[in-house]
Image (spheres, helix red, strand yellow):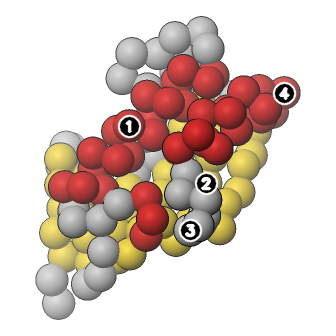
Amino acid sequence: MSIQRFHTGPRMSQMVVHKDTVYLAGQVADEPTPDVERQTAQILAQIDALLAEAGSDKSKLLSATIYLVDIASFGAMNKAWEAWVDPANPPARATVEAKLAAPEYLVEIQVTAAK
């Protein structure tokens, strides 16, 4: 059984690949701004890079979970999401309101994809 771990730290890996499935840790903006749409766009670019590193891409997304500090920002997050997601292959998705790890983070996204 082959398990590959990428960008591993003392608490977690940013990505784990098992067989033909790619699991990403929750991603937050590298340079948080007070704008949910811009944070979401940053996160989606990070997801693109991680998926490419694993030999996958957004057309192979299986599921996504999006955490928002304020569910009222759902529309702003969706503007960035809809500009990014492959409309022919959208994943199963859940969006929830949640308290995140630090106050500067307004959105966190976790995805699973096929390879």
Q: Quadrant of the N terminus?
A: bottom left
Residue 112 visible to the viewer: no
Q: Please, what secondary structure does the residue beneath circle 4 have?
A: helix
Where residue 10 sits, quadrant-wise, is: top left
Of mark 1 and mark 2, the one earlier in the sequence is 1
Q: Amino acid at mark 2?
A: Thr
Q: Nearer the viewer, residue 99 or 24?
A: 24
| Numbered badge on residue 65 | 2
Dot 4 amino acid type: Ala
Q: Estimate the spatial distance between the alpha carbons at disc 1 and disc 2, rounded to whole Å.
A: 16 Å
1 and 2 marks in contact (CB < 8 Å): no
Q: Which residue is mark 3?
A: 89
Mark before the other along the chain sequence, 1 or 3: 1
Label disc, if present, on residue 4 of the rendered structure: none
Give the residue number, with chain letter if any, for mark 1. 45
Q: Residues within 10 Å of mark 3 (few under 14, many from 20)?
A: few
